[in-house]
Image (tube, rainbow, N blue to C red):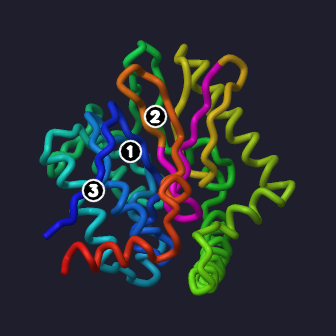
């Protein structure tokens, strides 16, 4: 029997870069988030399933099943679920029709324009189209992905030690990325490119994912928002009933320690 949990209501929720099918996915935290939010519309902004990694080595645990089940439950409960594939789940892009495609109550689209309650319009896309490494040299992108996966594995063991010492989850890989000057420059170029595309289309802003770096800032009069990820961090973008947009760090807000979600799952299914 499920234990009672507090539920948070939002007009819209944006999440991306779940990377289901990898050990790096923080499925425990993500399942906790999906259980405790309700929304009118849910955007899945790419890299939901990691096809690159699954083609090399199969990994899929109970938490990944639970995340998929919860997303489908949202769709069955009346939430409009829009799935915009990214580069790691690009196999779904081949299915797309000009007007999108609906599967199991989930609408697949290459991109979308979201209008907030206060009338602002935002381009919603994964963002890999503006990453020169992914766009022009896929082999180099995959090579970089391998190194990144290694960093995430180190991060996983690092947090296992922190958990045993009683410390909460903290992303070593995200911290390292912020210290590398070239990575910071690349993020800045990415943000400017996405904001420029929204401005070119006459929109108020852009919501994207891809680079695993949650951010909300104005770039030349356009609001750039990256909803982050569920690998290095546990972040989402939410829209309140009045149109206010907010980035939330689910792990920090709920003071979740590493594997805390798994212990909660055991209690709920006992």
The residue under the point 36% across, 50% down is 93
Q: Which residue is mark 3?
A: 5
Q: Residues within 10 Å of mark 3 (few under 14, many from 20)?
A: few
Structural crowding at the residue carrying mark 1, measured as other residues with C-alpha within 10 Å and reported as few (<14), some (14–19) or many (≥20): many
Q: Quadrant of residue 2?
A: bottom left
**Helix, strand or loop for disc 3:** loop
Q: Secondary structure at mark 2?
A: strand
- Residue 261: where, in percent of width, then height? 39, 71
Does the residue at mark 1 contact the one at mark 3 (Cβ under 8 Å)?
no
85 on left or right of 66: right
**Image quadrant occupied by the C terminus:** bottom left
Gap between marks 1 and 2 measured at Cα: 8 Å
- Going by the image, does 33 lie left or right of 270? right
- Which residue is labeled 1 in the image? 84
Q: CA distance from mark 1 to mark 3?
A: 29 Å
Tell me which label, 1 or 2, sits earlier in the chain: 1
- Residue 218 in sight here: yes
SS for dot 1: loop
Dot 1 and dot 2 residues touching (CB under 8 Å): yes
Between residue 62 and residue 19, name the one nearer to us: 62
Q: Which residues are magenta?
A: 222-236
Figure quadrant of residue 199? top right
**Whole-percent x and y of residue 13?**
38, 40
């Amino acid at each position: 029997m499920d234990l009672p949990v507090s539920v948070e209501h939002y007009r819209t929720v944006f999440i991306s870069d779940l990377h289901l099918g990898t050990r790096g996915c923080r499925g425990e935290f993500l399942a906790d988030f999906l259980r405790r939010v309700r929304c009118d519309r849910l955007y899945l902004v790419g890299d939901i399933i990691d096809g690159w990694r699954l083609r090399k080595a199969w990994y899929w645990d109970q938490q990944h099943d639970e995340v998929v089940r919860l997303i489908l439950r949202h769709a069955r409960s009346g939430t409009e679920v829009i799935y915009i594939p990214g580069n790691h789940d690009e196999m779904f892009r081949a299915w797309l029709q000009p007007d999108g495609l609906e599967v199991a109550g989930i609408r697949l689209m290459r991109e979308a324009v979201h209008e907030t309650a206060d009338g602002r319009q935002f381009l919603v896309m994964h963002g890999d189209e503006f990453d020169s490494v992914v766009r022009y040299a896929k082999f180099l992108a995959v090579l970089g992905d391998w190194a990144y996966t290694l960093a995430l594995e180190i991060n996983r063991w690092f947090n296992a030690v922190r958990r045993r010492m009683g410390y909460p989850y903290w992303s070593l890989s995200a911290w390292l990325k912020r210290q590398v000057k070239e990575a910071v420059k690349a993020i800045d170029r990415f943000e400017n490119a996405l904001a420029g595309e929204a401005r070119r289309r006459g929109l108020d802003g852009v919501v994207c994912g891809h680079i695993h770096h949650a951010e909300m800032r104005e770039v030349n009069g356009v609001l750039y928002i990256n909803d982050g990820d569920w690998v290095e961090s546990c972040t989402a973008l939410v829209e309140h009933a009045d149109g206010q947009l907010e980035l939330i760090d689910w792990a920090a807000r709920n003071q979740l320690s590493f594997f805390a979600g798994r212990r909660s799952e055991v209690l709920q299914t006992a």
